[in-house]
Amino acid sequence: MLTQAAPSAECQACGHEIAVMTECRTPSAFRTDFRPDSVDEDDLMSGRHRTVAAEGREVRLDAIAGCNLAFDLQHRSQIFRLNRGAATGEGDFAGFEVSERRTPCNLPNPNRRGSLQVFLTDQYIANEPRFAKLGRRVESTASEGPFWLAARKTTDSLFIAPTRRPPGSRIHRVGPLRPEGTGGILSVRAAAISATFLLVQRAALDLDIDPDEFEVLEPRRTRTLAGDEVPVLQIADELVNGAGFCERLARPIADSRPLVAEMIHSIVHDLDSYPLADFLPNVHVESCDQACYRCLQRYGNRAYHGLLDWRLGLAFLHQCLDADFSCGLDSRFDACYGLADWPTLAARYADKMRRLGSKTEIRQTNSGLWAFRLSQRDPWVLIVHPLWDVERPSGILASALDELGHQTRTVDTFELARRSWKVRRELLEHSR
């Protein structure tokens, strides 16, 4: 069992206060009733929230010369595979509650006459309907929980972060989702996860290994010495005690820069190598506006398929690599291969919203951005890129907001591509 934390604490990695801490427990073993049952794997994936995270210890980032990147290689890093239970709301999970049971077990009778029934004690069963028949509940023992399930291992981990966040960018909003906008933003978190899978799949090609040799950890944020919040991409060796792959990525090569920096530069700029050589042919660009099995999706990352987006991953890595890259806020969408057709996609999603309601109108602003409104009495909704900072707008974003008026709302293309009906419903509820 992991030690139970205090009710509140300060995160060693980013300095933010952790308001609520949850106890985690590692089961000593698992049990079965030996009865075969048909289980849909997709139901298991959707019914529980599983994640892999690194220990929240301080990350000592070393700046890499000639770019905006910094990295930290940690040996014997603690990695946790967490099962937080069913999702109960934005950023909240139910965890698990268990009760002590006396479980009957039929053993062969030494006299070979029937079977011998014994009872196993100290058996803890989850308080869920499908486990209701597993043993007799001990009424004198109170239910324990809720807590998360955790499996811990020690291995090598590699942490990559920008040394400075580009102006007008919100790439630091990669943390866990929290109500009232105090935590991460789903689309930014998806961009960071997509960027991490891009890096892992490129590293697997260069090292001639299977991508599953790396463990993709969910992103987090940290503070630089200057006090700036930046995102941290995290990967680890899959094997316990490390396999040397993260260490190889951190090893210096050209100009004393680590291999991982050269890989990220190639991912963003090299048209003759993966991923651009595979992603940019028209047959893929025209058919894939998020992710598919030709680009980022594979069986090993199926739990993240709903978040993956190859364009967002490229744009995220570009902003990490170059602190002066404005991600299209200067109208230069051709400066990044992940942005080249973003205006076209935004126009497509605007037209999609128009077709969802007979009174919906769309328009293109003078700065080239698209907007829609559900009726003439509703405010305009500006379509923005997921990595733009809408709280401190700049460039063409600021110009478009000034043109549309102070009541203008924003929605990013990540949400429109996946949940257009939900966006429309939330807008209608807000206008009532």
Image: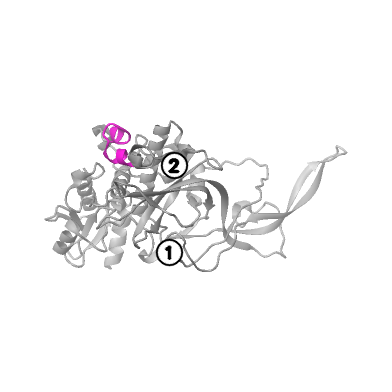
Residue 137 is a magenta residue: no
Above or below — where is 4 with respect to 416? below
Give the camera-side residue of 365 and 318: 318
In the picture, the disc for residue 302 is 2
The reply, left or right, for residue 139 in relation to residue 252 is right
Name the foreground residue: 13 vs 45. Answer: 13
Residue name at image x 16 percent, y 59 percent? 400
- Looking at numbered disc 2 in the image, what kind of residue is underneath it? Arg
The magenta stretch spans residue 267: yes
Occupied quadrant, residue 204: top left
Q: Which residue is mark 1?
A: 15
Q: Secondary structure at mark 1?
A: loop
Q: Residues within 10 Å of mark 2 (few under 14, many from 20)?
A: few
**Nearer the camera: disc 1 or disc 2:** 1
Q: Secondary structure at mark 2?
A: helix
Q: Which numbered disc flags the more N-terminal residue, 1 or 2?
A: 1
| Side of 271 where 96 appears, left or right | right
